[in-house]
Image (tube, helix red, strand yellow):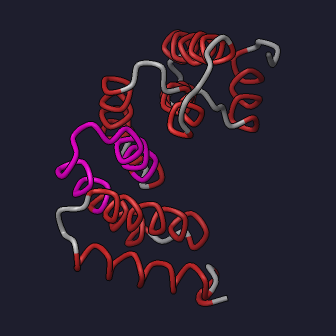
Amino acid sequence: GAGGDGRELADAAAGAWQAARLRPRWGRAWRLVGAIALERAGRRHEAALAEEAVAAFRRAREENRNDVWAALGEGQAHRLLGDGASARAAFQAAVGVEPNCVPCWLELAALAVETGDVDQARAALERAEAARQLGRRTTFVSAYERRLATADPELLGRLHASLGGGGR
């Protein structure tokens, strides 16, 4: 692929940037720029791409302060850069917008595990599990709501293993 991340992602990045330039007030375009940059950063292990993701997600949040996915992505990009404090702030902003955002709570739990704060990790994992349970009892009307209640099974398993609990 193109520098280890595939021609498709490079083409997608170009298209997302074009959309963001054409409609600079459209937060979803900036979120897409950020998501693609974050994916490329993870594949290529390039800080510049993670920094691009942070900037794009921030721009998305400027356009829509209630964009939980932009806050989540910004936190993930900060985490990739090793900036735990900024990652935590972004994840906390995300759960401030959507208190039942399972992926956001799992990211907070993972960050707490990485920093050795077991109590905080357990508390965040408990919030994620409570939100998952609520999701199981709820009839969703949108893909957005389903995504809020969806856990990454690999991350969930790693967290349970790290914190000594069984997977649920």
Q: Is residue 46 above or below residue 161?
A: below
Q: Residue at x 32, y 36 (%)?
A: 85
Percent of width and height locating residue 145: 52, 31
In which quarter of the view is residue 90 placed? top left
Q: Residue at x 42, y 53 (%)?
A: 77
Q: Residue at x 39, y 62 (%)?
A: 34
Q: Is residue 159 left or right of residue 60?
A: right
Q: Quadrant of the C terminus?
A: top right
- 65 or 92: which is nearer to us? 65
- 140 or 127: which is nearer to us? 140
Residue segment shown in magenta = 56-77
Q: Please state the total of marks drawn on the protein image.
A: 0
Inspect the magenta stretch and tell me whether residue 72 lies in it: yes
Q: Is residue 15 above or below residue 54?
A: below
Q: Residue furthest front?
A: 141
Percent of width and height locating residue 88: 37, 32
Q: Is residue 138 left or right of residue 27?
A: right
Inspect the magenta stretch and tell me whether residue 1 lies in it: no
Percent of width and height locating residue 133: 66, 11
- 116 or 98: which is nearer to us? 98
Q: Residue at x 30, y 62 (%)?
A: 56
Q: Is residue 56 above or below residue 1?
A: above
Assign the magenta stretch its main secondary structure.
Answer: helix
Percent of width and height locating residue 139: 62, 19
Q: Is residue 148 left or right of residue 4?
A: left
Q: Quadrant of the N terminus?
A: bottom right
